[in-house]
Image (cartoon, rainbow, N blue to C red):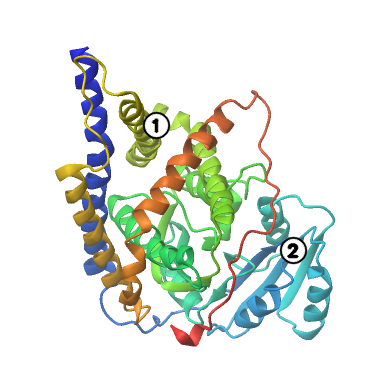
Amino acid sequence: MIAAHDFLLFIAAFVFLYPLFMSFVWIVGAFVFYFRLERGSSAPPELDRYPMFSILVPAHNEREQIEETINRLLELNYPSYEIIVADDGSTDGTTDILHHLVKQHNQLRAVYMRTNNGKGAALNAACAISNGEYILCIDADAQLEPDALQWMAWHFNHYPRVGAVTGNPRVLNRTTLLGKIQTGEFATIIGLIKRAQRILGKVLTVSGVIAAFRKEAIASIGLWDPHMATDDIDITWRLEKAFWDVRYEPRAIVWVLVPETLEGLWRQRLRWSVGGVEVLKKNLDIWKDWRQRRLWPVFIEYVTSILWTYCFWLVTAIWSLQFIFGPAKGFMFVAPLPPMWAGSLLSLVCLLMFLSSFALDSRYEKKMFRHLFWVIWYPMVYWMINATTVPVAFAKVMLRKKGVQGQGVWESPDRGLRTRRLDEH
């Protein structure tokens, strides 16, 4: 009983101290990134050449957003680019809108797929007819800032081994508590962590909503895998395993719509979790090759985060049983809520993490700190959803019959209740 008690205390400490430790890692790494690579002029860099970009926009039932997305792309501050929309079996009138727009703009072309084959298949089809040296992939509801291509092209022009550059998504719709919370999440998780990962050597994943690729690099790995639940993390790992460099560029900004209902957020995060577990399962062989050692810490951290979710539910279940039925004889388990000094310290570090990420991203959004009040709810919402989706995704992937591939098909996500204008930020 004593050994079991000590083990459970160890698990409880892990549940609280692991996020605490990683928060310090992300904060320190992000500030190192800022002072080394980000601080300075915010004006777009001067380029010695302007290679052609092919902007690929996979779309499925995007009637309400697609025209605005294309109109924004036509206003970019870059002299040489084309836009290719891959209509992946839309049934809501998106096809008719594209027919009309293609006739109006010479820069715009479209690929029409009869059935919904998934985002990866749509990107492969669009890439097959592209003319650009570099490829930019954005979602059909995204609104790209005019200077984004210049910031990304600078990395490709100066460093031949750069295979991908991911940008900085900013939340556009903030009409509900979930929308406001995700404003802080994108700054904290996507911004702060990607900065730190870049300093540590390997980025876990490019952002699916905005990622630029060297065409030579993605061709060398066989383009996108149409069977993966998420295209972004899979192609990131395949590029890095092939020794291409993947970078984060916070000044390449895109505005995105996020889910503003619990159901929409759940479906999105479950798909992300399934994609992450699929990639872990697919890349177990990285331990056989010493040359892949820089990916080992990323792999370990992701596996540890999955283990954390199971420990969280174990601690919660034991405490709940103890609360209902009383402690067993000679056995008293410390309740995870309230967490005493560990929880207080974790809350303080969490606030420090928010303040740090807001300080770094305030140069891209002047009124960033006004969302701090809403972000204090982030740990409760994000951790609970993450702790729920990860075990479901893990079971779904690991219990899949051998030889049965996942499905890459998609459906229109929850894009929120109302869109804010860009000039309000």
Left/right of residue 264 with respect to residue 349 in the rendered view = right
Residue at screen point 37% across, 78% down: 364
Note whether 348 is above or below 312 in the view shown.
below
Q: Is residue 388 visible?
A: yes
Tag 2: residue type?
A: Asn
For mark 2, what is the residue? 61
Work out whether residue 404 or residue 172 is closer to the camera in this orientation and state it. Answer: 172
Quadrant of the snapshot with the N terminus: top left
Mark with earlier residue (1, 2): 2
The relative height of residue 316 versus residue 149 in the rendered view (above or below) is above
What numbered label is drawn on residue 310? 1
Is residue 203 at least partly visible in the picture? Answer: no
Q: Residue at x 37, y 32 (%)?
A: 307
Quarter that holds the C terminus: bottom left
Return the residue found at the far left: 341
Q: Position of residue 17 (x, y in %)?
A: 22, 40
Q: How far apart in space, not on screen, are marks 1 and 2 (Cα)?
A: 36 Å
